[in-house]
Image: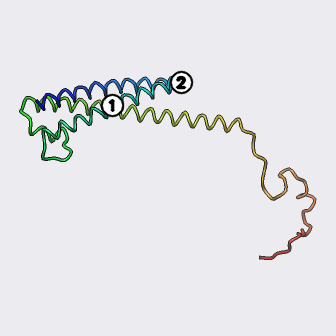
Amino acid sequence: MSATLLIQTLDKLVKLHLSLHEVTKKKTEIIKVGDMEALEQIMKDEQAHIMSIQKLEEARMTISKRIAPHFDNPTVTECLSFLNQMDAKQVSDIAAHLKNIIIELKETNILNQQLLMQSMQFVNVSLNLLKPAPKSINYGKPAGSNQNVQNYGKQRTSLLNIKA
């Protein structure tokens, strides 16, 4: 009974992760286009998927504790030794498939993060180009001043006569 529940829960996790992966692929395209409204909506969809995945993960943990009561937080791998061979093989296959989906999902998220960083850098560069150049805040004479030529060879006097 518990093995069947674990298999069903893992199947649901696979389906949700596949759906989330499709959402993140759409997010990549939206980031490339730069549609902020669509990006906001897709992020809401992602959050809904994540909440569903968290609930299923909690259910998986409860089922895993029933299968492997000797462990505090048993993993799917730790549950395999408590299942019959046929169920263990099915659970192992589903878990391997889920692991591959999660790896692909992680890679897509890394790509999205890099695209967002590049977009932010582009926006910052564009804003810096639009800003007026700051005036010089140096204490010296302006660069185009001819006083250096006229005072060449003369001793300069200062209001503060300090020798270091």
| Quadrant (top left/top right/bottom left/bottom right) for the C terminus | bottom right
| Quadrant (top left/top right/bottom left/bottom right) for the N terminus | top left
Q: Which residue is mark 2?
A: 37
Q: Earlier in the sequence, mark 1 or mark 2?
A: 2
* Spatial CA span between label 1 and label 2: 26 Å
Q: Position of residue 21 (x, y in %)?
A: 35, 27
Name the colour scheme: rainbow
Residue type at mark 1: give it: Glu
Q: Is residue 50 above or below residue 22?
A: below
Residue plotted at (67% across, 39% down): 128
Among the 4 quarters of the image, the one containing residue 59: top left
Q: Secondary structure at mark 1?
A: helix
Give whichever of 37, 153 is nearer the camera.
Answer: 37
Give whichever of 83, 127 is nearer the camera.
Answer: 83
Q: Which residue is mark 1?
A: 104
Q: Position of residue 4 (x, y in %)?
A: 13, 28
Give whichever of 28, 129 is nearer the camera.
Answer: 28
Numbered label tally: 2
